[in-house]
Image (tube, rainbow, N blue to C red):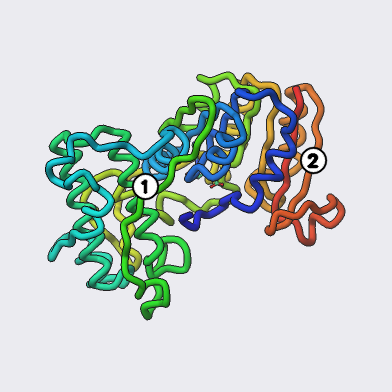
Amino acid sequence: MLRYLGSKTLLVEQINELIDPQPKGSVFCDPFGGIGTVGSYMKQKGFQVISGDLLQFAHYFQKALIQLDAPPTFPNLISETGGDVESFLNQISAQHGWLIKSYCEERSFFTQENAEHIQGCIDAIWGWKASHHIDENEYAFLIASLIQSMDRVANTAGTYYAYLKRYYRKAIQPFNFRFLHPVQGEYPCQCYLKDANTLVKQHECQILYLDPPYNTRDYAKYYHLPETIARGEVPIPTGKSGVPDRHEIRSPYIQQTKVEGAFRELLASSCCQMILFHYTDNGLLHEEFIRDTLSELGGTIEEYFFDCKGYRTSSLSSSVSSKHHVYKVTL
Ligand SMILES: C[S@@+](CC[C@H](N)C(=O)[O-])C[C@H]1O[C@@H](n2cnc3c(N)ncnc32)[C@H](O)[C@@H]1O
């Protein structure tokens, strides 16, 4: 999967153990769902997942992996692609375009050959959307698959905040367009492009899993290129990394002056039986504030610590080695 800041890939089993046992079909709500790592795991485990994020590209990953149960069949693309959209996108390329110019010729995010191929895919997918040959789910699926495929050959150290000076090993591999694989589950799941506080207000659930950003890093900037591709907007790149000058709504969870109010408001409007709050001890919200705010809900609080590799550690060693602090509130 795409390397995503704060991804819980190594911790999904541990998170599941903290909520086990729960009846099949229980609603698991993941309003800071990112690219769907936790939500797709929980779907497989028999939960009805509701997930959200503010970023368009993250929302499309969630749709592709969690909301869909199988790759779309693209009935309106049969005549153009011969019925095999994956192979079709694997063979096209473009000579010119904004990605080639701004993110290859001016900034070495991709080799020339890969940039031409990626540009061809972008032009085709954006064009199919504009001509109504694909619907929103099909577009989401193709865009998420493209971003995942593109990330495998991106000349970065992980995020799109910077590119490497020389083309690194992974960047000189040939680009291959590959479909993502939607995860199978027994219950319907829904993904929303929404602020977490709004989503929580609108949905009751059994388990509310909260995994917000814990510092001031802005995901919209670190993943600007996936976001541009998902939004379908030709960007006006600025600066060394080509971050477009977009007037985004900045999440309150990355702002020291707003995070406490947002967290308090979210908890006050939640309606659930269990909350798992996944954070770090050096984050914008301080431990004491978190404990006080969670205890205002009533219920019992248990605390768990995990290191970066997903191993459970004791609270005593937490200050030294733990990165993950999970507060479990049973209501
Ligand atoms: C720590 S990451 C989640 C990682 C995810 N659990 C995973 O394993 O991939 C936090 C996510 O919260 C999103 N986010 C930040 N502020 C938000 C808000 N106000 N509402 C919804 N999502 C938000 C970010 O875009 C980011 O994807």
Query: Residue 152 has which mark?
Result: none
Identify which residue is drawn at 32% across, 52% down: 146
- Residue 320, picture quadrant: bottom right
Expressed as whole percent of the image width and height from the top left, the position of residue 230 reads: 31, 45
Say which element carries label 2.
strand
Q: Under tag 1, what secondary structure?
A: helix
| Amino acid type at mark 2 | Glu
- Mark 1 neighbour class, 10 Å CA radius: few under 14, some 14 to 19, many 20 or more: many
Left or right: 329 as drawn, with respect to 56:
right
Mark 1 or mark 2, whichever is nearer to me: 1
Image height of 120 relative to 45, above or below: below
Residue 81 versus residue 214: which sits nearer the camera? 81
Is residue 127 rendered to the left or right of residue 54?
A: left
Q: On residue 303, which mark appears?
A: 2
Look at the numbered disc 1 and say if its residue's Cβ is closer than 8 Å to ligand 1.
Answer: no
Q: Residue at x 13, y 65 (%)?
A: 95
Would you name the residue on which mark 1 appears?
144
Q: Amino acid at mark 1?
A: Ala
On the picture, is 257 further left or further right than 190? right
Q: Residue 199's x, y, as percent?
A: 50, 26
Residue drawn at (41%, 34%) of the image:
68
Residue appearing at x 44%, y 32% in the figure: 67
> Residue 58 in the image: x percent, y percent?
43, 44
Labels 1 and 2: the sequence-earlier one? 1
Residue 311 or residue 44, whichever sits in front: 44
Q: Is residue 330 above or below residue 319?
A: above
| Name of the residue lying farthest toward the right | 316
Q: Is residue 44 left or right of residue 140?
A: right
> Which quadrant of the view contains residue 266?
top right
> Residue 306 location, x and y as percent?
74, 52
The quadrant the C terminus occupies is top right
